[in-house]
Image (cartoon, rainbow, N blue to C red):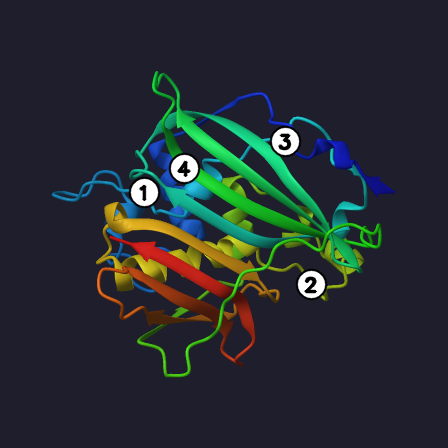
């Protein structure tokens, strides 16, 4: 088994992707919107509430940039692949329904010794936009165990340090035991999150929650706490997946706001109740 390094730098053919109002609502429910209080997030969970205009959670932008890289990365056991990092930038608020053209490029394959880190950048442009102005740009990486040791570059690193003070904000969100079964309806049917035998092959006692589901829960906390629940104020978000989450776990999102004038940014971490950090090195920018 080996990875195809010639895939680096090759942009995929455009892929067209569409979503509807229902897709946006299903995603919101999949990342916990309305859980515990069904009246709390009606702009994201309903389309016909009186005097409430439907809106789209910013982290739905990650789903709007899903695209194939245009070629296989090589031959490897898919049970050895886990989502490692995720970042995205919204160039303007997401429409409730829309169609985009998505292109994706493998930007690097890095040697981490025990495995390989494959980094990808994707760009979504609204179909029919003659200016080809991006709606969303996302960057992600996956870690493939057993595919390292080929003598390559270990990849770039960025400085991040947890502030030496209590968080400025801390939000706790429970997840449901069946959360992964609901979230998978938004498109990620990886059996790691539903099939106990597949999860066992990957070394887990039972199916784990999608990393992007945890990411969506975290994005909701950032949106409501730092942006006044207004998606137009949400600019970008990035983080590294550092430990698995089991459906039913409670997530605790800690935020440290940058006190620099006009910085409009914050650092964050997401942890389970026992203190295990599950999204690390988090950064968010907002208006």
Q: Tags 2 and 4 in contact by the CB under 8 Å rule?
A: no
The relative height of residue 256 versus residue 57 in the rendered view (above or below) is below
Q: CA distance from mark 4 to mark 1?
A: 13 Å
Give the residue furthest to the right: 1
Q: CA distance from mark 4 to mark 3?
A: 17 Å
Mark 1 or mark 2, whichever is nearer to me: 1
| Between discs 3 and 1, the one toward the N terminus | 1
Residue located beneath label 3 in the image: 69
Asked if one can make out residue 261 in the rendered structure from this viewpoint, the answer is: yes
Mark 2 or mark 3, whichever is nearer to me: 3
Residue 206, numbered circle:
2
| Between discs 4 and 1, the one toward the N terminus | 1
Q: Is residue 250 left or right of residue 70?
A: left
- Residue in the foreground of this view, choosing between 163 and 127: 163
Q: Tags 4 and 1 in contact by the CB under 8 Å rule?
A: no
Residue located beneath label 1 in the image: 56
Q: CA distance from mark 3 to mark 1?
A: 26 Å
Q: Residue at 39% x, 31% y: name it.
A: 134
| Between discs 1 and 2, the one toward the N terminus | 1
Q: CA distance from mark 2 to mark 3?
A: 30 Å
Asked if one can make out residue 34 in the rendered structure from this viewpoint, the answer is: no
Q: Residue at 81% x, 43% y: name it.
A: 76
Secondary structure type for disc 2: loop
Residue located beneath label 4 in the image: 136
Q: Residue at 27% x, 42% y: name it.
A: 55
Mark 3 or mark 1, whichever is nearer to me: 3
In the rendered image, residue 64, in percent from the top left (x then y), is placed at 45, 36
Secondary structure type for disc 4: strand
Residue 130 in which image quadrant: top left
Q: Residue at 21% x, 38% y: name it.
A: 48
């Amino acid at each position: 088994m080996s990875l195809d390094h010639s895939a680096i730098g090759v942009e995929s053919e455009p892929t067209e992707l569409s979503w509807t109002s229902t897709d946006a609502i299903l995603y919101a429910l999949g990342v916990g919107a309305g859980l515990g209080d069904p009246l709390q997030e009606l702009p994201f969970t309903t389309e016909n509430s009186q005097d409430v205009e439907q809106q789209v959670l910013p982290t739905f932008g990650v789903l709007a940039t899903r695209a194939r890289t245009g070629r296989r990365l090589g031959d490897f056991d898919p049970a050895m692949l886990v989502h490692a990092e995720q970042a995205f930038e919204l160039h303007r608020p997401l429409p409730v329904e829309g169609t985009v053209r998505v292109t994706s490029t493998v930007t690097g394959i890095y040697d981490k010794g025990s495995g390989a880190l494959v980094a990808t950048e994707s760009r979504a442009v609204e179909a029919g936009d003659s200016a080809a102005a991006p709606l969303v740009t996302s960057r992600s990486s996956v870690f493939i165990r057993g595919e390292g040791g080929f003598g390559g570059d270990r990849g770039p690193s960025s400085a991040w340090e947890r502030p030496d003070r209590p968080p400025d904000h801390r939000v706790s969100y429970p997840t449901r035991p069946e959360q992964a079964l609901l979230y998978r309806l938004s498109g990620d049917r990886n059996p790691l999150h539903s099939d106990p035998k597949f999860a066992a092959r990957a070394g887990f006692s039972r199916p784990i929650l999608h990393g992007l589901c945890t990411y969506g829960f975290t994005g909701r906390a950032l949106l409501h706490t730092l942006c006044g629940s207004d998606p137009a104020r949400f600019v970008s978000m990035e983080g590294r997946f550092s430990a698995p989450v089991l459906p039913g776990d409670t997530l605790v999102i800690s935020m440290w706001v940058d006190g620099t004038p006009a910085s409009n940014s914050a650092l964050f971490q997401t942890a389970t109740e026992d203190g295990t950090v599950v999204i690390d090195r988090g950064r968010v920018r907002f208006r």
